[in-house]
Amino acid sequence: MNRAVFGIFACLAIVALLATLGGPARASDLDFGGYTQARYTVGPGQAGDFDLRRVRLKVFGPIDSKEKTEVKFQVDLGKLDEGKRVIELKDAMLWHRFSDRVAARLGFSQMPFGLEVPESSSHRLPLERSHAAHELFPAERDTGLYFYYTPKRERRAHVALGVGTGIDKWRQPDASGVRDSRALAVMVRVQWPQVRGGVAGASYIHATRVRQGTRFENDIWGAHVRYHFSTGLVVKGECFAGRMLGAPVGGWYVQAAWMGHNDVLPYYRYDSYDDGTNPLVYRRHAVGLAYEVSDDTRLTLELDAVRDAQNRRQTTVSVQWQVKY
């Protein structure tokens, strides 16, 4: 049984159990949604490539009469257009609120590390996450139990703390066919709200990974900030540093976007990543323009100039049409 099918049955079983314990849950309480990102990319000397980058379908909502417990289940159908018979599980989780201050999340979902890792791809302006986030947290998801503390007073620290089985992709074969046989991770994030919706904070994850019989103790530190100027300019940045599979790693990005009171959103992001094994580091400049056609539709034009760790240079132009439903 593949992971997506297993997740469906597990999620349905948990929903049925908690609905029985917490009171009647009506089908009308659940919402259905998702989004699709259709992308066309072209580069010098390259034929254009069309891709359904993400096709997400989700069901979410309260499952008890007091609406303290919510479920979220999401799959991605994007690989079906590549001829692969793969439906990827993206979320299968329960969210329970114990009080106005304390909540918990149980199941399979994105890790709450920093800013970019837990951010939805439908919300992010650049078409992809930074290379550091992509390499250190591939696919961003783990199975775990996380607790969230949200203070009532403004400007007080918000805390996320949890334990899980490590990034799910770690247990899938990489390009060389190697994968983790076991992993256990502990993660914490502390952040403080800033004026006009900004935030500043730090994150840390310690993961014990067993790969080909060798045990690795991995530590990643992160710091993040997002500041909203009164003019509509939003600047955010994030840095990562630590050790992964015995090698020192580090990366960072900085992004500026004009989020003024209009439907045209220009942005620029620079990101860099050092995997500790190459003399050069990965660098990328991304310049883009997003047009909010409607509340549910966005058209994005982005130019990416990349120099990878092997000193290969590539420039691409992408157009993406995103529709939420």
Image: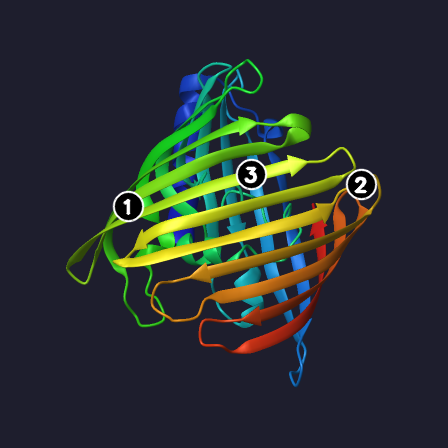
Q: Residue at x 39, y 71 (%)?
A: 279
- Inter-mark Cα distance, 3 to 1: 24 Å
Front residue (pair 60, 166): 166
- Precedes in sequence: disc 2 or disc 3: 3
Which three-letter amino acid code belongs to the residue tagged 3?
Answer: Val
Q: Residue at x 50, y 17 (%)?
A: 151
Q: Are marks 3 and 1 in contact (CB under 8 Å)?
A: no
- In the rendering, which numbered label is found on residue 207? 1
Residue 212 found in image quarter: bottom left
Which three-letter amino acid code belongs to the residue tagged 2?
Answer: Gly
Q: Residue at x 34, y 41 (%)?
A: 205
Q: How many marks?
A: 3
Which three-letter amino acid code belongs to the residue tagged 1?
Answer: Ala
Q: Taking 267 as reference, is 224 above or below it?
A: above
Residue 136 found in image quarter: bottom left
Front residue (pair 12, 230): 230
Front residue (pair 323, 40): 40
- Precedes in sequence: disc 1 or disc 2: 1
Query: How far from the left and from the top, in percent, is residue 54?
Result: 59, 57
Q: Quadrant of the C terminus?
A: top right
| Residue 88 in view | no
Residue 244 shown left or right of residue 254 in the figure: left
Residue on which the image places disc 3? 225
Residue on which the image places disc 2? 260
Residue that sits furthest to the left in the current view? 213
Q: Quadrant of the N terminus?
A: bottom left
Query: How far from the left and from the top, in percent, is residue 263?
Result: 83, 46
Helix, strand or loop at label 2? It is loop
- Inter-mark Cα distance, 2 to 3: 19 Å
Q: Taking 197 as reference, is 117 above or below it?
A: below
